[in-house]
Image (cartoon, grey):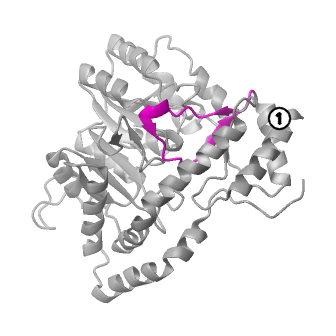
């Protein structure tokens, strides 16, 4: 195959070229007023993101997606002796916040075709923790992996039955929806990341919390600013320095006018991949049919085995096509979490079979709103050629 140039996994520069003038105008406005912390752009962004997610949603800008998760758990008083259930197949941030607060992460297996948390396995592990009686089941963190909403009706039903807090980690999925309801309005709270490669990304770190609960939103605002009360020198609770920078809010405001257009482009590109790879033996991520609007944060496929993935990866690299492995090791196999996993359920627990298997078989392909149809065809042709051997 003729090499027609490299294909990047992400392309931030193409978007920047379209909005450069608005970026410069927004940044200049911040330089002019000088309110680099808690400037008016933060409040404007919060209002616009809340409105995007639906009536009654509150938005609180914070310093990163990780801090969003931590603040949400801090607000619930989650700590030592508490069990926080989360998928074994996700990024480390989802689990580390529980340990930072002294709680115990309980890893749950995921579904083979959606890559998202398996409600049946979640129910099993909650029952095991309750039976042992050492830990209090307090929270579930569902992750909308690669832009696909988790099974929130099932997760919420379990949380309501068990009296647990439901936290949506939508770091990779802002803009997605399930059953006509956008993420941000499903969980008791939703954590967003604005890392540069996300569906809505800034030019550094940033994040937000979304909730329909006004009291929770007020608590998040206090916790992100050292637990302050009515003034900065009234400290009501132990908080953290977790504020969203005004400059990053300005960048996000410059990007927002393109956001829905880019979501539609991601959907078109995903459909091209789906159609080209259908029936090939390369597994595509289930989209829950008409129920879900997939934000397509990453386009991730699964191979029959690790050897097939390695052949595909080598073939793509030889043609200058970027690809990534998200994630090469499930969290319960990471050294940082080995002890927590060993002690979370001391009796016999079901193995995390799907999470371990997927880690050896998944591969993420180029996915951004400015990917051309010819580029998608080239990626798929290389993949299919590798699959044929």
Asked whether 40 falls inside the magenta stretch, the response is no
The answer to whether residue 314 is left or right of residue 342 is: right
In the image, 372 versus 317, the foreground residue is: 372
In the image, 34 versus 79, the foreground residue is: 34
Seen at 25% across and 74% down, the residue is 40
The answer to whether residue 366 is left or right of residue 5 is: left
The 10 Å Cα crowd at callout 1, few under 14, some 14 to 19, many 20 or more, is: some
From the viewer's perspective, is residue 88 above or below residue 368? above
Q: Position of residue 377 (x, y in %)?
A: 75, 50
Asked whether 303 falls inside the magenta stretch, the response is yes
Q: Which residue is mark 1?
A: 387
Label 1 secondary element? helix
Q: Position of residue 272 (x, y in %)?
A: 65, 45
In the image, 308 versus 293, the foreground residue is: 293
For residue 76, which quarter of the picture? top left
The answer to whether residue 139 is left or right of residue 96 is: left
For residue 74, which quarter of the picture? top left
């Amino acid at each position: 195959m003729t090499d027609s140039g490299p294909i990047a996994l992400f392309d931030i520069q193409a978007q920047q070229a379209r909005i450069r003038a608005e970026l410069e105008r927004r940044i200049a406005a911040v330089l002019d007023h000088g309110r680099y912390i808690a400037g008016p752009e933060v409040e404007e962004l919060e209002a616009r993101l809340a409105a995007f997610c639906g009536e009654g949603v509150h938005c609180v800008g914070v310093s990163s997606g990780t801090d969003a998760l931590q603040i949400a758990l801090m607000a619930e008083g989650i700590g030592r002796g508490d069990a926080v259930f989360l998928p074994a197949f996700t990024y480390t941030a989802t689990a580390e916040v529980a340990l930072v607060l002294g709680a115990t992460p309980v890893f749950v297996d995921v579904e083979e075709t959606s890559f998202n948390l398996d409600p049946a396995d979640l129910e099993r592990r909650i029952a095991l923790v309750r039976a042992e009686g050492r830990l209090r089941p307090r929270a579930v963190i569902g992750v909308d992996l690669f832009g696909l909403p988790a099974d929130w009706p099932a997760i919420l039903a379990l949380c309501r039955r068990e009296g647990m807090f439901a936290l949506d980690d939508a770091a990779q999925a802002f803009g997605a929806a399930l059953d006509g309801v956008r993420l941000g309005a499903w969980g008791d709270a939703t954590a967003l990341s604005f890392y540069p490669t996300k569906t809505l990304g800034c030019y550094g770190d940033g994040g937000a919390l979304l909730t329909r609960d006004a009291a929770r939103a007020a608590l998040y605002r206090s916790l992100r600013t050292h637990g302050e009360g009515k003034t900065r020198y009234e400290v009501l609770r132990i908080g953290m320095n977790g504020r969203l920078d005004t400059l990053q809010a300005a960048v996000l405001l410059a990007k927002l006018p393109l956001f829905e257009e880019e979501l539609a482009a991601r959907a078109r590109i995903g459909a091209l991949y789906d159609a080209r790879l259908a029936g090939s033996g390369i597994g595509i991520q289930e989209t829950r049919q008409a129920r879900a609007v997939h934000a397509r944060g990453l386009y991730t496929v699964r191979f029959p085995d690790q050897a097939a993935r390695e052949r595909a990866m080598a073939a793509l690299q030889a043609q200058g096509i970027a690809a990534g492995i998200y994630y090469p090791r499930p969290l319960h196999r990471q050294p940082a979490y080995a002890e927590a996993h060993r002690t979370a359920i001391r009796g016999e627990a079901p193995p995390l079979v799907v999470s371990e298997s997927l880690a050896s078989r998944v591969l993420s392909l180029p996915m951004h709103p400015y990917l051309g149809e010819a580029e998608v065809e080239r990626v798929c042709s290389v993949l299919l050629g590798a699959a044929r051997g």
